[in-house]
């Protein structure tokens, strides 16, 4: 999976199309990511001793195929590729050619 935690991504399909956000959690085995401010879901929490019942809003997982890496230098979404430099595999932006990490 080419998207990692703390990457900035742009949602390209679905109800939140066009939103940008930071990846909070990457789940490579499931092929999903949780993006800040995207796919907001309501969670109902029962009342417990001393704590009243509440409805919480939290981000739900979104499929990694529905997001695209957002290159802050090029100010545009871009595909991610891999280069091997000095025996180390590194990600790079295909639009600007810059090394991501």
Image (cartoon, helix red, strand yellow):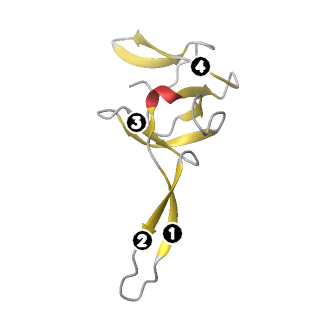
Residue that label 4 marks: 78
Disc 3 crowd, CA 10 A, few/some/many (<14, 14-19, 20+): many
* Nearest to N terminus: mark 1 or mark 3: 3
Disc 4 crowd, CA 10 A, few/some/many (<14, 14-19, 20+): some
* Nearest to N terminus: mark 1 or mark 2: 2
Mark 4, mark 2: which one is toward the viewer?
A: 2
Residue that label 1 marks: 55
Q: Are marks 3 and 2 in contact (CB under 8 Å)?
A: no
Q: Are marks 4 and 1 in contact (CB under 8 Å)?
A: no
Residue that label 2 marks: 45
Helix, strand or loop at mark 3:
strand
Left or right of residue 67: residue 90: left
Q: Residue at 53% of width from left, 19% of height from top? A: 99
Q: Could you say where residue 94 lies in the image, as x and y percent from the top left? A: 56, 12
| Distance of label 4 from label 1 (alpha carbons) | 37 Å
Q: Which mark is residue 46?
A: none
Q: Quadrant of residue 2?
A: top left
Q: Quadrant of residue 12?
A: top right
Q: Are marks 1 and 2 in contact (CB under 8 Å)?
A: yes
Disc 1 crowd, CA 10 A, few/some/many (<14, 14-19, 20+): few
Q: Where is 20 relative to 36, above or below?
A: above
Q: Could you say where residue 43 lies in the image, as x and y percent from the top left? A: 46, 62
Q: Are marks 4 and 3 in contact (CB under 8 Å)?
A: no
Helix, strand or loop at mark 4:
loop
Residue that label 3 marks: 32
| Distance of label 4 from label 3 (alpha carbons) | 19 Å
* Nearest to N terminus: mark 4 or mark 3: 3
Helix, strand or loop at mark 1:
strand
| Distance of label 1 from label 3 (alpha carbons) | 24 Å
| Distance of label 1 from label 2 (alpha carbons) | 6 Å
């Amino acid at each position: 999976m080419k998207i990692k935690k703390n990457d900035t991504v742009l949602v390209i399909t679905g109800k939140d199309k066009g939103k940008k956000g930071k990846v909070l959690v990457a789940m490579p085995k499931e092929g999903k990511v949780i993006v800040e401010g995207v796919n907001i879901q309501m969670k109902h929490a029962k009342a417990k001793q001393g704590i009243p019942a509440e409805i919480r809003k939290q981000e739900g997982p979104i499929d990694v195929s529905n997001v695209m890496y957002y290159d802050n230098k090029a100010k545009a979404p871009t595909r991610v590729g891999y280069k091997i430099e000095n025996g180390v595999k590194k990600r790079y932006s295909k639009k600007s050619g810059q090394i991501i990490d």
